[in-house]
Amino acid sequence: MSLYKRFETAFMPNYGVPPVALARGEGTRVWDVDGNEYLDFIGGIATSSLGHAHPALVEAVSKQVATIAHTSNLFLHEPEVLLAEKLLTLLNAPGKVFFANSGTEANEAAYKLAVKYGKREGRSYFVAAENGFHGRTIGALSLTGKPSIRDQFGPFPIDVRFVPYGDATALKEAVTGDCIAVFLEPTQGEAGVVPPPEGYFEAAREICDSTGALLVADEIQSAIGRTGHWFAHQADGVTPDILTLAKGLGGGLPIGACIGFGDAGKLFAKGDHGSTFGGNPVACAAALAVLDNVDLDHVRSASARLRSGLESIRHPLLKGVRGRGLWLATVLSEPRSAEVQSAAQSAGFLVNALQPDAVRIAPPLVVTAEEIDKFLATYPAILSEAAK
Ligand SMILES: *Cc1c(COP(=O)(O)O)cnc(C)c1O
């Protein structure tokens, strides 16, 4: 029986059967179980920051697993302290860290911090963005503005009011002195890599300051160099009250983080939250290797090359390019992203049909100029194949 058939037999159908079974990788290159080679221009959904099998990541993880793999939170260990300190240094703002294992768990921590704040201040509801994505567990799902994945699992414990993303006036109307917190992505990832209009995050900061609502920046997809900055909010010139991280932080190892700045970092009391695996030494060692090896100058030059190359392609199926850094969507003139994904696969490139009219491109942050040029040289033919 093929691996695909066995997958279908053994697994719940929530993912369907993915189109490629990957066996191994090296840098931006991956090979499937049949030995076919691809250039990975999706990086495990903007997660494999250092590409595959990066020597520094391999060494850090191997060393740590051979030293001590797990302590639980009954005991502390040096890698978690080093990682928290390093993140706070990069953030350059006084804060406190909680480690989880995934994006949705990082947001659950943010959600619980906000609940504590809401109870203390006598506030009653959250605001989040339409089409926003914050994760699949019940708290994070309640903040997710996609009715198709949210509604069937309601009702949810807290009232969440949704506003159109990027509309500062709508945000201002929705956020009153009764609002606990505003959850926003600095650029919406799952919605199609949609950056907000200029000034939106500054406006959100002002609205939260004037009403006392907490601003929660979900940077699970946008941080760790993805936009050419360590954190997207730094480019926007705004510090949130709470920040959540995951995806790119571990370079493929599961880790999430929730960081509270100022007063928001002091909301949890002893016993309020926890995770057996959160801050696991191996995951922390991986994240430290990522932070030591992401080269922001390289990300900026690579993303400029990729973006200008894509923008110079003239093709009837290609309407435009949007996004930030090495985190782009090619927007199609027709809903043919599934065809683009499969034509790309046939041509030896992995991309992601994110929305019917948007193809996500998020290569590892170590992608080379030659690899980008190869992709750019082939993309017009991929589009033509998809348009057939
Ligand atoms: C991926 C993602 C999440 C969820 O992360 P998981 O690790 O899949 O739980 C939450 N928010 C954003 C913005 C994401 O991109």
Image: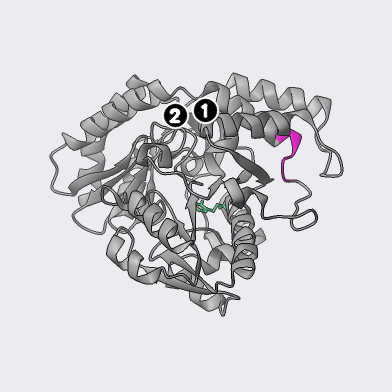
**Identity of the residue drawn at 36% across and 41% down:** 236
Camera-nearest residue between 30 and 347:
30
Residue 9, picture quadrant:
bottom right
Kindly state the secondary structure of the residue where label 1 is placed: loop
Camera-nearest residue between 115 and 226:
115
Q: CA distance from mark 2 to mark 1?
A: 6 Å
Residue 281 included in the magenta stretch of the image: yes
Q: Is residue 129 visible?
A: yes
Q: Are marks 2 and 1 in contact (CB under 8 Å)?
A: yes
Q: Residues within 10 Å of mark 1 (few under 14, many from 20)?
A: many
Badge 2 amino acid: Leu
Of labels 2 and 1, earlier in sequence is 1
Residue 350 pos. (x, y %): 41, 40
The residue where tag 2 is placed is 365
291 vs 170, left or right, is right
31 vs 9, left or right, is left
Residue 51 pos. (x, y %): 51, 29
**Identity of the residue drawn at 57% across and 74% down:** 158
Task: Give the main secondary structure, helix, strand or loop, of the magenta stretch.
Answer: loop
Camera-nearest residue between 67 and 273:
273
Q: Residue at the far right: name it.
A: 74
The tag on residue 279 is none
The tag on residue 50 is 1
Kindly state the secondary structure of the residue where label 2 is placed: loop
**Identity of the residue drawn at 49% across and 76% down:** 151
Q: Residues within 10 Å of mark 2 (few under 14, many from 20)?
A: many
Residue 80 pos. (x, y %): 72, 34
Residue 40 pos. (x, y %): 44, 34
Residue 132, picture quadrant:
bottom left
Span of residues in magenta: 278-282
Residue 305 included in the magenta stretch of the image: no
Camera-nearest residue between 174 and 283:
174
